[in-house]
Image: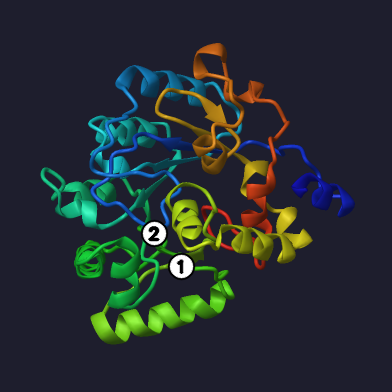
Amino acid sequence: MFLKYMTENEISLKRNTLDTIQLNIGRKCNQSCKHCHVEAGPERTEQMNKETLDKILTLISKSAHIQRVELTGGAPELNENFRYLITKLKKMKKQIAVRSNLTVFFEEDQGTTPQFLKENMVEIIASLPCYTEENVDKQRGNGVFTKSIKALEILNDLGYGRNEDYLLNLVYNPQGLGLPGKQEDLEKDYKLVLMKEYGIIFNSLFTITNMPIGNFAKELESNNQLEEYKKILVNSFNPSAGNNIMCKSLISIDYQGNIYDCDFNQMLNLPKKPINIENLDSFDQISEDIIFEDHCFACTAGYGSSCNGALI
């Protein structure tokens, strides 16, 4: 059905210039969130090893257009080669972003991670699905909001959120069946409340639509709401968002070096036999073809959704 909507609106199904690599470097996380499409958690053991990281670094160095590398997980900070990878990327003069849950900074051996990120001018994209304690703890676990605020205070003290050199961007996820509202309006609300209540500042807010896969799909199914939510996504299809979906310029690589069109396709194992980094000499060899299925409606609903926020 998604392909039909795209073709009827004359939207290209091909990848444009590939400029962003997103690395899922492990499924282990210190949290188990209800909306997590990765189904990450403390019990997960999958981790990208140094050999795979080195191969990816070599491919990046041989690829003409790669400008940005995003590290995600799980909690990417828990990968034992996390600092090694960032140091190498910094030497290659790539833009580096880490998608952090914030509370990981309070785990064992993570106390100096914020300072390390600052020293390497790493952009931090931090999960904070609401600016109220009740909603955050409901979605992510008791005590998570308080820890997140403490982590944001640490980052602010280091200079994050105060200028373009140390970017601190927050991520909003809606509750239940809802779609994100207008990103600009939500950002104003976040900035007002977080400054007034906690003295927290940040650069930008990214609104992300919950994808009906992983933990979120299980929660919807348990409430008999999965099909209803899927219908909401279809009925909210926005052609303008379709023209800007992130898979047009991004690929996602799992901890084993398998390549996917996005993090969501990775979690759905699409394609079933993905290309592996071992079969490439450069990321410039990646095909323009993109695998689309109906879960992609989450990226084109309403104002659109990507790992870096709204699309329109």
Residue at image mark 1: 204
Tell me the residue at 52%/35% (across/down).
Answer: 266
Left or right of residue 222, residue 112 in this image: left
- Residue 99 image point, x, y percent: 38, 50
- The answer to whether any part of residue 76 appears in the image is yes
- Residue 155 image point, x, y percent: 25, 62
Graded by Cα atoms within 10 Å as few (under 14), some (14 to 19) or many (20 or more), the crowding at tag 1 reads: many
Helix or strand or loop: what does disc 1 sit on?
Answer: strand
Query: What label does residue 167 carry, if any?
Result: 2
Total labels: the figure holds 2
Q: Amino acid at mark 1?
A: Ser
Corner quadrant of residue 50: top left
- The answer to whether any part of residue 312 appears in the image is no
Tell me the residue at 13%/50% (across/down).
Answer: 111
Q: Amino acid at mark 2?
A: Leu
Tell me the residue at 65%/67% (across/down).
Answer: 303
Graded by Cα atoms within 10 Å as few (under 14), some (14 to 19) or many (20 or more), the crowding at tag 2 reads: many
- Residue 177 image point, x, y percent: 54, 68
Quadrant containing the C terminus in the rendered view: bottom right
177 vs 20: above or below = below
Tell me the residue at 28%/36% (across/down).
Answer: 44
Disc 2 and disc 1 in contact, CB within 8 angstroms: yes
